[in-house]
Image (cartoon, coloured by chain):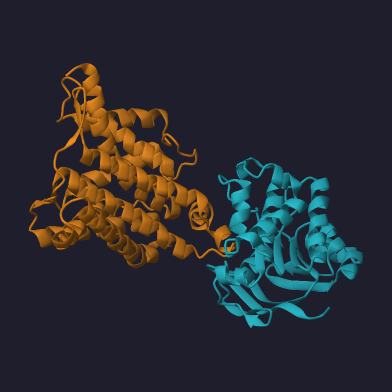
Amino acid sequence: MSEPILEIENLETYYGKIHALRSISFTVNKGEIVTLLGANGAGKSTTLRTISGLTRASGGTVRFLGEDITRKAAHDIVKMGLIHVPEGRKIFKGMTILENLELGSFTLTDEDERARRLQHVFEIFPVLRERRHRDSAFLSGGEQQMLAIGRSMMTNPRLLLLDEPSMGLAPFLVQEIMRIIVKLNREGVTILLVEQNAKVALKLANCGYVLETGRIVIQGDAETLRRDESIIKAYLGE
Amino acid sequence: MSFQDILLQQLANGLILGSFYALVALGYTMVYGIIKLLNFAHGDLYMLGAFIGFVVLSFLSAFLGDSWTGILCSMVLSMIAVGLLGVLIQRVAYQPMLSAPRLSILITALAVSMILANLVMALTDGEYLAFSTDLGYDGLELGNVFITYTQMVLVGAAAVLMIALYLFVHKTMYGKAMRAIAIDQDACRLMGINVNRIIALTFFIGTSLAASAGIMAGTYYGSIHFFMGFVVGLKAFTSAVIGGIGSIPGAMLGGLLLGLLESYGTQIPFIGTEWKDVFSFGILILLLVFKPTGILGKTEIERM
């Protein structure tokens, strides 16, 4: 269980003059659910964006499956099986649900495989099948999140970076999304989950890291973090 | 000629004019949709399409003749050449400006437009060149209305190109990626889409459509001139805005509408040929007053 899939070493990122990540290091092992916690502006999304190649790192390394991907283009990283579901879902509004899902499998040329993956997504999210020819702009927040996760599944991920999948969702929908994350994990997908909702995230994670102003200030297994309420309170303001 | 005949005759004229506008407007709207650039050089690429087609045809006519075979071959070759030039312009002139303020890239586009127009002016001494073809003036007579076969073929060819574009954009993965990039580039990168490659493809398709219109116009009017891209570029831009800039069906609709307005405008007493532009643009201004985003445009308004 302790074979690393993602290794981050001394990662540094700037947004203009803002030093967003200050020498962050952590490891995600194959098959795990790891959560990255922190308040707004702590650098959680920046960490994910730097890993997936959307934002350039100014120092340090990101290694995925043993390969250095720090300078690799985002679209090439995707082909290796590292998929990032960004903050705010970023679905293609104005295009149908089916088209959104198909674009998830853009790198694929095998039509049979595409159909198989589509089938798999529809099994997990029957609501998407019902509405597949509808414009995705008309989906509710929860359905949009399902579409975003479904779209990432079309890419056949090995490691999934999820940025606040619970954001803006009603509690029962948060439970539903978390249930699906666990299901994906059981199917063999490693998960790096960014959350503001520490309670929810620590319930399913193996271990967690707490970010504050671009630094990792606490790390430990989820069990310990969950018990240590004072730490959570101090850094996450709950 | 009865009133009905005039309506029909002008319908034919308007459709042909509108097809040219629509083909050029498509490139305008596609490029705007994908990188939010008003490519003012687009009309000049239409002009260049006509000139390259002219050069190719003068070589090919020895083997293929001046009729449809020769025209079709030179059209395909010119579309490829101008399409590649469009990609080159994007890479050299626009790509480095993408992160600069919006105004810089707009001025770059104006510069590219002047370079292309003046280059052709220097090469041709600013003369009109006769686009000589051997198509004849045969046609169909419907009552008092006469439509040449040339007109029919040109409108048909424009329709085929537009249908092909529509199918490409809606049925293929590359076409879907093109629409997706217009919505969210970052999300596309995260799907494994090489955004720069799709932008290049968009420029290729957009400029080659403009080139096809240039050759059709050369064939139709029988002469070409370095300045021919200027007015058509303006009108194509207008068509794209009327249809709702960024919308592909909108550009087709806007082009046809503008063509029809112009040809009917010539028939209205006291307006006639000299005032046809005033008439059609007047109506278009009215349309934009009541629907500022264009016929098929989204409500989102981007400040220029």
The N terminus of chain B sits in image quarter: top left
Where is B79 relative to B247, above or below?
A: below
Residue B84 image-quadrant placement: bottom left
Q: Residue at x 30, y 57 (%)?
A: B109
Q: Residue at the spot x=56%, y=46% of the render?
A: A95
Q: Quadrant of residue B158?
A: top left
Closer-to-camera residue (A114/A194)? A114
Name the quadrant containing residue B296: top left
Chain displayed in cyan: A
Q: Quick check: B124 left or right of A98?
A: left
> Does residue B300 lie above or below B145 as drawn?
below
Viewer-proximal residue, B91 or A234?
Answer: B91
Q: How many marks?
A: 0
Q: Position of residue A217 (x, y in %)?
A: 77, 72
Q: Where is residue B233 drawn, in percent x and y?
A: 26, 47
A154 relative position to B53: left or right? right
Taking the view exactly as shown, the residue that stands out farthest to the top is B2
Q: Give residue A19's position: percent from left, percent from top.
A: 60, 70
Which hue belongs to chain B? Answer: orange
Q: Position of residue B232 (x, y in %)?
A: 24, 44
Which residue is pictured at 50% across the width and 49% down the height?
A: B170
Residue A215 in view here: yes
Residue A84 shown left or right of residue A229 in the figure: left
* Residue at the far right in the pictured view: A227
For residue B121, above or below residue A7? above
Q: Is residue A20 visible?
A: no
Q: Residue at x 90, y 66 (%)?
A: A228
